[in-house]
Amino acid sequence: MITKGSPAWRYFGDFRGGLLAGQVLVLQVAHPVVAAGVRDHSNYTEDPWTRLMRTAASLSIYVYGGPEAAQYEADRLREVHRQFRGTREDGRPYSALDPHAYAWVHATLVQLAVDAQRFYGREIAPGDLEVYYAQMREVGWMLGIKDHHMPPDWASFRTYYDETIAGFAHNGTIGTLFDTIAAVPKPVAWLPDAIWNRLAGAQGRLQMFLIAATLPPVLRERVGLQWTDRRQRSFDRFRAVVRVAGTLVPPTLRSAHVRGLAALNVWYRGRVAAG
């Protein structure tokens, strides 16, 4: 069970994880089933900001919403995905509830918190890692992922994670994602176009830089992102700044925004249910 102050509670919602949003999306859609499902059934290219907020709201509930709310959200998510079917790029049929694809999406979220600390904080201690992973396996069970699709411990998870990535290649959905990042629409209508045009270019360049910096090298090369020693030095300086800034935020506040989002969602759904 995920309790206040436990490893999953401390690390999953750390605000520095937001810097890995693009990386996680690439890792997810590198899977051919996820790529086809996003291509066929997601509106993220037209409205990426709303899609991002909905995803963040859903994720927040699993760790910070309490057992009942987490189970409700997991059941809702599976029901939504049950109808998503189609044909992959290679011509094979797919279902969004393909157990390997479903488990992979969860695996990227498990790794997210670990990478956030590795790149921008302090690496999670081995003992905490084992507890964190055990807690995230519980989240996987709520999502309907079977034991045999989730490695039993952290070491075997890392082997599974690396071997899965080694089998990925570039695909059309990754290309569309990169195009969307480069030309993302403004998040709110009242923002002047002149201001957003400047901000959009900067955020697009930063996002692609962070994706290239944090993707596993084998996948970075396969999706065509260039990396140099000079860019690595720039990233080292960037993450040093983020690391220092992170130490100025008390540990209990580093996930406060995600915990607040979870509380808001639980409250809202309670009102809807009460009718």
Image (tube, rainbow, N blue to C red):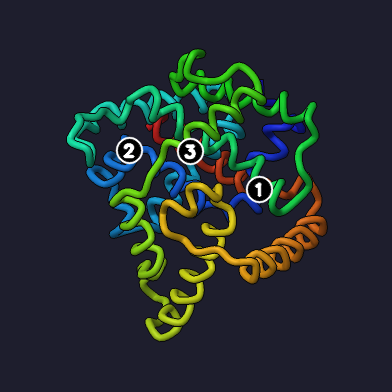
Task: Give the residue drawn at x 42%, y 77%.
Answer: 191
Question: In this view of the protein, which residue sits in the foreground, 218 or 155?
Answer: 218
Residue shown at the point (36%, 56%) measured from the top left:
177
Amino acid under label 2? Pro
In the figure, 184 relative to 118: above or below?
below
Where residue 189 appears, as percent x and y from the top left, is: 36, 72
From this view, report whether residue 216 is shown above or below residue 228: above
Residue 203: x %, y % from top left: 50, 70
Of mark 2 and mark 3, the one earlier in the sequence is 2
* Residue type pointed to by label 1: Ala
Q: Quadrant of residue 46?
A: bottom left
Report crowding for label 1: few under 14, some 14 to 19, many 20 or more residues within 10 A (C-alpha).
Answer: many
Residue at image position (33%, 53%) is 44
Label of residue 165 in the image: 3
The residue tagged with tag 2: helix, strand or loop? helix
Residue 121 on image: x %, y %: 75, 51
Spatial CA distance of label 3 from label 1 is 18 Å
Instruction: Single out the mark in the foreground, 2 or 1.
Output: 2
Residue 91 lies, with reference to residue 133, above or below; the image says below
Residue sticking out furthest to the top? 147
| Label drawn at residue 32 | 2
Residue located beneath label 1 in the image: 116
Disc 2 + disc 3, Cβ < 8 Å: no
Alpha carbons under labels 2 and 1: distance apart: 25 Å
